[in-house]
Amino acid sequence: MESLSNKKKVLEQKPLTFLERMYLPAIASGMAITFSHLFKKPATIRYPEVEREFSTNFRGMHSLKRDENGKERCTACGLCALSCPAEAITMIAAERKPEEKDLYREEKYAATYEINMLRCIFCGLCEEACPKEAIYLDGPIVPADYLRKDFIYGKDKLVEAPLEMKK
Amino acid sequence: MEIGFVLEKFILVAVIFGISLVIAMYSTYAERKVAAFLQDRLGPDRAGPFGILQPLADGLKMFMKEEIIPTTSSKWLFIAGPGLALLCACIGTAVIPWGSPMKIGDRIIPLQVSDINVGVLYIFGVVSLGVYGVMIGGWASNNKYSLLSAIRAASQNISYEIAMGLSIIALLLMTNTLSLKEIVDQQHGWRWNILYQPLGFLIFIICSFAETNRAPFDLPECETELIGGYHTEYSSMKLGFYLFAEYINMFVSSAVMATLYFGGYNYPGMDSMAIWLGPTWAPLFGTAILFAKIFFFIFLFMWVRWTIPRFRYDQLMNLGWKGLIPLAIANIIITGVVIAIIEKF
């Protein structure tokens, strides 16, 4: 039958010649290859001292952003939680009081905002879903911990430092 | 027996014993480093500069580990196994000539523990005793996988011992002696046996790989098929003894190969060097040359290990019985005929 892709290759098994059956030339060339690797640069990165640079589109720990005045951008619309395929995000919305005007950008804000880092798959859909540009996955690798409850990151860990602290 | 003789032998034995233990210790480090470099890695580099304290750390770990003796094992044999393996590995160095006789003052000290006239036979005897360590260890564990593995190891060692013994006969036909010292002295001035016996050497080196249980013949240790091999039930330093014995065996067989085929402590320009350095230091330089050859062979062992994949068991037996033994016999016949022709004319 004609092959569809024209990529079919017919392999024929030839019996090995005497030289091939001695294996010694093949062993010698193999040894030469391994020997040449002695002089190659090791690919190792000495981890604790040297850290590998992340690529520019690396998705790490989430951070909740503030706007240029230092107010939290998040309005607790819930789109990130809705878009999350792993259902790692939960939040409780609250209404802003007049004296909190400098803290939150709009009338509604997230009183609690939690991401379960054990569930999160770092797909970045929350980042894409957010209409307020409030959440970005621009942090480092999520650190290891001992207890499962410690992997539920609240606002204390997620929200960016206030503007004056940043300076 | 005068006191000086006893003293000089005692010092020689102590030094050789110490050197072979240190070399075995650092072979484990070298193995990991060579493996790393051949695979574009760095290898151990945490303990001390370049990781040179790694063997000490490994040794300490081995000693500190919990010692487990299975209740169903035959206890004394279980303990005797690794001891026997290490003992057989260590006593092989006794007949290897480490250098030409050294002159200190009026005294001439041979740099060889004992120049017995059946040195080659002694080496072979000791090497074949090494199988007992493996066999007893596997049997005493009272574990069927260990036993199977030990039987495999024993049959492998015995099979290759035959080919090894036959390959050396051609060499002995040429040299007409069994004393290692004389074999070395005959190779003085570029008459290395490798030039006359390349096939014999090839068979010999393949068999030494099999005898020392090194890759590609490391079937006695087989993580995938028989758990750990003959030492599955062993823990802490008893396992360490088995692994250590392997490295000492590697050192001894490297020394034997260098002695039998690569001229031992002979090197080009040896005579003029002997005049220049004087009778005390020239033999030590020769010893250094011998050690350089030994280190090359140890490197070769490691180099091959990270190049050639492991044999299947039937392939191993095929190579030993159908490949190497007939080749070794052919080599004997050719050597014999050539010697007969040379003597005739």
Image: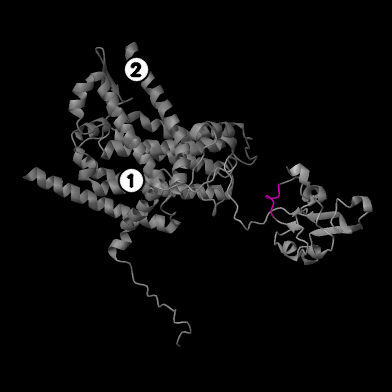
A160 left or right of B162 in image: right
> Which image quarter: residue B270?
top left
Residue appearing at x 78%, y 48% in the figure:
A157
- Quadrant occupied by the C terminus of chain B: top left
- Quadrant occupied by the N terminus of chain B: top left
Residue appearing at x 78%, y 53% in the figure:
A66
Q: Magenta includes B203?
A: no
Quick check: marks 1 and 2 in contact, CB under 8 Å?
no
Q: CA distance from mark 1 to mark 2?
A: 33 Å
Disc 1: which residue: B205
Disc 2: which residue: B8
Q: Residue furthest front?
A: A69
B47 left or right of A162 in image: left
Magenta stretch bounds:
A138-143
**Amino acid type for the residue under numbered disc 2:** Glu
Residue A23 vs residue A118, the one in the foreground: A118
Vertical position of residue A2 compared to residue B13: above or below = below
**Amino acid type for the residue under numbered disc 1:** Ile
Image coordinates of residue A67 in percent, x first then y, are 77, 54
Chain letter of disc 1? B
A140 left or right of B296 in image: right
Chain letter of disc 2? B
Residue A106 vs residue A137, the one in the foreground: A106
Q: Earlier in the sequence, mark 1 or mark 2?
A: 2
Instruction: State the predominant SS element of the stretch in magenta.
Output: loop
**Mark 1 Cα shell of 10 Å, populated few (<14), some (14-19), many (≥20):** some
Residue appearing at x 44%, y 82% in the figure:
A6
